[in-house]
Image (spheres, rainbow, N blue to C red):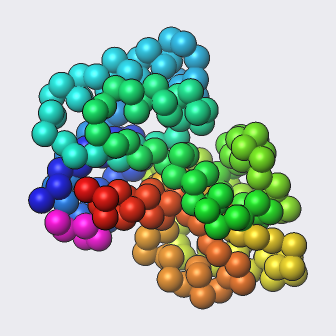
Amino acid sequence: MLTALIIRSSENVTIVGDLERYYPDVRWIDVIMPFLPGRGETQEERHQILTFLTAMRNKYPEINFVLYARSYGVFSEEGRAAISSIFSVPVITATGAIISKLRTLKANKLYVITPYGQTRHGYELKWLNEYGFEIIASSCLGHDAGEEILAIKTEEVVAALKLTNSLKSRLDGIYVACTFLRTLTMNEELQQVASVPVVTATGSMLWELDQLRNAL
């Protein structure tokens, strides 16, 4: 049995249970990362992240891989490399997996759905643009609180996704943001409704995890 460290925020209360259902052959060590201000990209913020992760590495030396189910500190390649350097085992980050999945699918022209309010939604579009993705259109569902995002129903995401029908000739893919959003339970219905591939934050991590498990 493989042993994995999952790093999550305290608000993301469903992801561990979902992972245990999808991967019962993996022993998941649940680690809640304390709240830290900012985006995790300043020198001081990164120092706090690395100090915390070093302590977790030392506490759990038996792990086979790390699932960093957060975007904090990993928007940049430098941030992802810094976190990966702490561990001697593979590290899957949400942002890194999203970028990799979109590029593998050659999904460059995107319709983006986020659960967020306008400010956080705008930041999501910004980092995607910085990695060369073209945002054809986007939709934000207006939720910033973790408990509100967790409560979003499949129907709400499907309604936003159906807005792409008139854009399908211009799109390579649809990206649905946020690891809080329970897209693992929505995925089949989302793919059925969409005319182009749907890439989700959590689904991207598990896509990368499946590749990793095959290699271990």
Image position of 211 (left or right of 204):
left
Q: Residue at point 50% right, 18% down?
A: 45
Q: Please tell me whether residue 79 is drawn above or below residue 115 in the rendered image.
A: above
Please indicate, yes or no, whether residue 73 appears anywhere in the rendered image.
Answer: no
Q: Residue at x 17, y 66 (%)?
A: 25
Quarter of the figure with the N terminus: bottom left
Residue in front for this viewpoint, 124 or 196? 196
Direction from residue 165 to residue 113 in the image, left or right: left
Determine the image quadrant of residue 76.
top right
Q: Position of residue 44 (x, y in %)?
A: 50, 11
Q: Quadrant of the C terminus?
A: bottom left
- Asked if residue 164 lies left or right of residue 98, the reply is right
**Residue positioned 41% across, 23% down in the render:** 49
Residue closest to the eye, 210 or 197 = 210
Q: Who is closer to the viewer here, 97 or 44?
A: 97
On whether residue 12 falls in the magenta region, the answer is: no
Relative image position of residue 51 (x, y in whole percent)? 34, 17
Write down the quadrant of residue 108 in the picture.
Answer: bottom right
166 horizontally vs 84: left or right: right
Q: Is residue 82 visible?
A: yes
Magenta span main SS: loop
At which x and y percent is residue 75? 59, 36
Mark count: 0
Figure check: 63 above or below 160: above
Q: Residue furthest bottom?
A: 192
Identify the residue at image location x=50%, y=33%: 80
Q: Tell me where the magenta segment starts and ends, as one range.
A: 21-25
Q: Residue furthest top?
A: 44
